[in-house]
Amino acid sequence: MNRYAFLILPSHNRVYADAAPTLARAELAVLSAALPDGRIEAESVAETAIGGVPYVTFAASELSQRDVGLLANLSSLYALFEAAGPAGAGAGGLAGELLRPVPLRRLDRFDDDLLTILKYPGKTNEQFTKLLLNVTLASSAFARELETRRLSVLDPLCGRGTTLNQAVMYGFDALGADIDARDVEAYAVFVQRWLKDKRLKHQADFSPVRRDRKVVARRLTAEFAATKDEYKAGDVQRLEVVEADTTRVGEFFRPASADLVVTDLPYGVQHGSHASHGTGHSPGRAGGERSRDGGRTLARSPLELLRAAAPAWARALRPGGAAGIAWNTRVARREDAAEVLAAAGLVVLDDGPYRAFRHRVDQAITRDILIARKPAS
Ligand SMILES: C[S@@+](CC[C@H](N)C(=O)[O-])C[C@H]1O[C@@H](n2cnc3c(N)ncnc32)[C@H](O)[C@@H]1O
């Protein structure tokens, strides 16, 4: 067994305050099950102060490059070290030891301003979004396929694209839907500007979708690649976002077209009723109830919305894929949300680390996540 320690990103502590180490440990525990070669000893994962600074420490069989390639993407990870000597006493066996930095190769394919440029009320925190995507991916049957094929992620309540951008960052295809015309339009403007500013080879279009001569939605489509050679070879990433009710995703995306569904339910908080502390949910965005679309009030409660939409989301998922949803536990109970996912034919993962993601966002929101798998056949 080798011993490892990682430093938590300083911003992670700001986002989650007291919950940061617990969330980091839970994410590590879920990712460890998806390591291609190595194995992390579940009981060894701990928070340990070394030289007065908090680290997350763990013991693992010697990690391969592929294992480190996966762990490098932990949403909380700042720097990873391996203990250079035999186990010592105290501090997780790492006291008084030399820590050797482990070189990290993240999946990231673009500058990280892709994730940070757009700022708007109601934006889901980027680090939390990355955590949710990571945990969903690691819970699917596809984490080991990262190197061999392009995965696809659907966010059926995509807002201005936080999840879609993280998926693009990882080199995945990204599919989205949102009912809010202004959100979809703002995202379309952003994406087209970003592709131009970064001088990426691309094709992009934002136009109405017509059926029987009637406009049934508006849709953003884009194809692009990180390099000219990839683009020329047709090795492109695809982005497709429709302005439509999420229960209609089946009209726009084929069954089994998404490897992962990753989404953040409306928080069910009235406009302006909660303040931002830079935590994870900016002020002025009421996921569900606030009128943001030409005066139209979104009628369903978060749980009703989930109930109405889960069957369509489950159909869009490929067998072996996983859905990860985040929501405000103050407006919907975990058991009720889990029941809705199960009724849609998904298998909810509800033990061990999966129960350790609940955290306070602000006085109106306590957020949790649920991960559910679509059976392989
Ligand atoms: C919590 S927000 C998602 C925020 C997003 N992750 C972001 O950072 O921009 C929930 C989203 O659900 C959308 N929404 C609510 N009801 C919907 C429905 N019936 N169909 C599609 N989208 C809906 C809202 O417009 C909002 O953008």
Image (spheres, grey):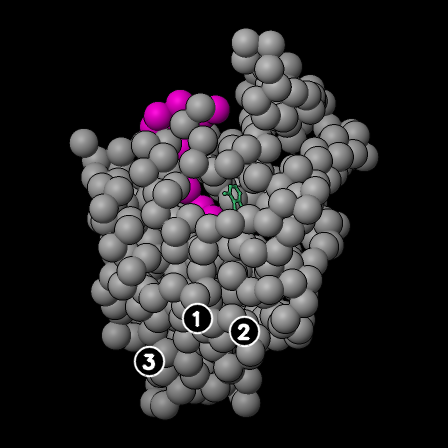
| SS for callout 2 | loop
Label located before the other in sequence (2 or 3): 3
The circle on residue 87 is 3
| SS for callout 1 | loop
Tag 1 and tag 2, C-beta contact below 8 Å = yes
Which residue carries the number 2 mark?
Answer: 364
Name which residue lies at 28% across and 57% down.
338
Whether 19 is drawn above or below 147: the answer is: below
Tag 2 and tag 3, C-beta contact below 8 Å = no
Pinpoint residue 377: horizontal percent, then vertical percent.
18, 31
Label 3 Cα crowd, 10 Å radius (few <14 / some 14-19 / many 20+): some
Tag 1 and tag 3, C-beta contact below 8 Å = no
Q: Give the image quarter of residue 28.
A: bottom left
Which residue carries the number 1 mark?
Answer: 330
Name which residue lies at 35% across and 25% down.
255
Count numbered badges in the picture: 3
Whether 20 is drawn above or below 369: the answer is: below
Taking the magenta stretch, the answer to whether it contains residue 254 is yes
From the viewer's perspective, is 52 left or right of 306? Answer: right
From the viewer's perspective, is 265 left or right of 179? Answer: left
- Kind of residue sitting beneath label 2: Ala
